[in-house]
Image (cartoon, rainbow, N blue to C red):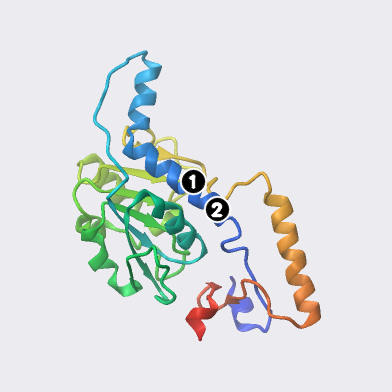
């Protein structure tokens, strides 16, 4: 939002979480693809090679979710049946779902990083989250861990991510977003066998137009009727704040 909008009395709402199901499905696809070695097996299939290689399990791993808003909560709900241990951080660490083992304030991210086998980013992009995952924080993650980014590309310092992947410190990354989109043809990420890249389609849905239109129409009806709006944005933060976090 522009400074003028932030300073004005204009009411802002967002579609945050409206496509949380789709983002959760995308997250699961990226994560399972990496764990089960799909990039390597796809490349082998193109060479007509039928060779077994080691894979990893999702069950009984520890997963960290950075940002437990609408998308983060749906991702946690989707992962829970896999018997994972779920840790999360959020700017408003309230209303912890039963299937999330620990929910910590956002400023405890550095404590979470060494504990998780998989780190999933679900934070908005603002001054506090730009470059959130840099070389220092990547080095705090477990050796051999995975990074999944379904948030915004600039949440991660891409050069530092490339270095961590090339060194083998990180086992892999699933990226629905990149620092600059489209990702440059010269990026080394394209050729890495331990990276899955999708072109920012996490919230893509066959029902996107209908669902977005219905959501906007419902908010317009509420506005005209003087009723509370859905997903009312806190303009200082740049995203909606859950009612439980405000009370």
Measured as percent of width and height from the top left, residue 14 is found at 62, 67
Q: Which mark is residue 142?
A: none
Q: Residues within 10 Å of mark 1 (few under 14, many from 20)?
A: many
Q: Between 42 and 130, which is closer to the camera in this rendering?
A: 42
On the question of residue 31 being in view, the answer is yes
Q: CA distance from mark 1 to mark 2?
A: 9 Å
Q: Residue at x 26, y 64 (%)?
A: 112
On the question of residue 187 being in view, the answer is no
Q: Between 124 and 105, which is closer to the camera in this rendering?
A: 105
Q: Between 155 and 14, which is closer to the camera in this rendering?
A: 14
Q: Nearer the viewer, mark 1 or mark 2?
A: 2
Q: Secondary structure at mark 1?
A: helix
Q: Which mark is residue 26?
A: 1
Measured as percent of width and height from the top left, residue 67 is found at 42, 65
Measured as percent of width and height from the top left, residue 17 is found at 56, 62
Q: In the image, is 112 to the left or to the right of 158?
A: left
Would you say the residues marked 1 and 2 are in contact, meaning their CB atoms lie under 8 Å apart? no
Q: Residue at x 57, y 77 (%)?
A: 235
Quadrant containing the N terminus in the rendered view: bottom right
Task: Find disc 2 in the rendering and name its residue.
Answer: 21
Q: In the image, is 163 to the left or to the right of 99?
A: left
Q: Residue at x 75, y 58 (%)?
A: 213
Q: Secondary structure at mark 2?
A: helix
Nearer-N-terminus badge (1/2): 2
Q: Residues within 10 Å of mark 2 (few under 14, many from 20)?
A: some
Q: Quadrant of residue 240?
A: bottom right
* Above or below: residue 42 compared with residue 116: above
């Amino acid at each position: 939002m522009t400074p003028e909008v932030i300073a004005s009395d204009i009411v802002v709402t967002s579609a945050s979480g409206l496509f949380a199901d789709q983002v959760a499905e995308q997250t699961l696809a990226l994560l399972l693809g990496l764990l089960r070695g799909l990039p390597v097996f796809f490349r082998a299939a193109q060479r007509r090679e039928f060779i077994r290689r080691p894979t990893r399990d999702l069950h009984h791993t520890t997963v960290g979710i950075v940002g437990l808003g609408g998308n983060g909560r749906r991702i946690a709900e989707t992962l829970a049946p896999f018997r994972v241990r779920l840790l999360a951080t959020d700017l408003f660490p309230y209303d912890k779902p039963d299937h999330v083992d620990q929910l910590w304030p956002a400023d405890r991210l550095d404590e979470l990083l060494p504990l998780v086998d998989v780190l999933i980013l679900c934070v908005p992009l603002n001054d506090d989250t730009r470059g959130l995952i840099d070389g220092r924080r990547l080095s705090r993650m477990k050796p051999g861990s995975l990074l999944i980014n379904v948030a915004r590309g600039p949440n991660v310092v891409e050069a530092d991510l490339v270095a961590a992947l090339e060194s083998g410190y990180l086992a892999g990354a699933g990226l629905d977003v990149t620092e600059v989109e489209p990702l440059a043809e010269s990026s080394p990420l394209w050729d890495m066998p331990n990276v899955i890249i999708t072109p920012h389609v996490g919230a893509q849905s066959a029902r996107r137009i209908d669902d977005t239109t219905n959501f906007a129409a419902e908010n317009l009806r509420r506005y005209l009727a003087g009723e509370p709006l859905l997903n009312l944005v806190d303009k200082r933060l740049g995203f909606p704040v859950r009612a439980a976090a405000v009370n």
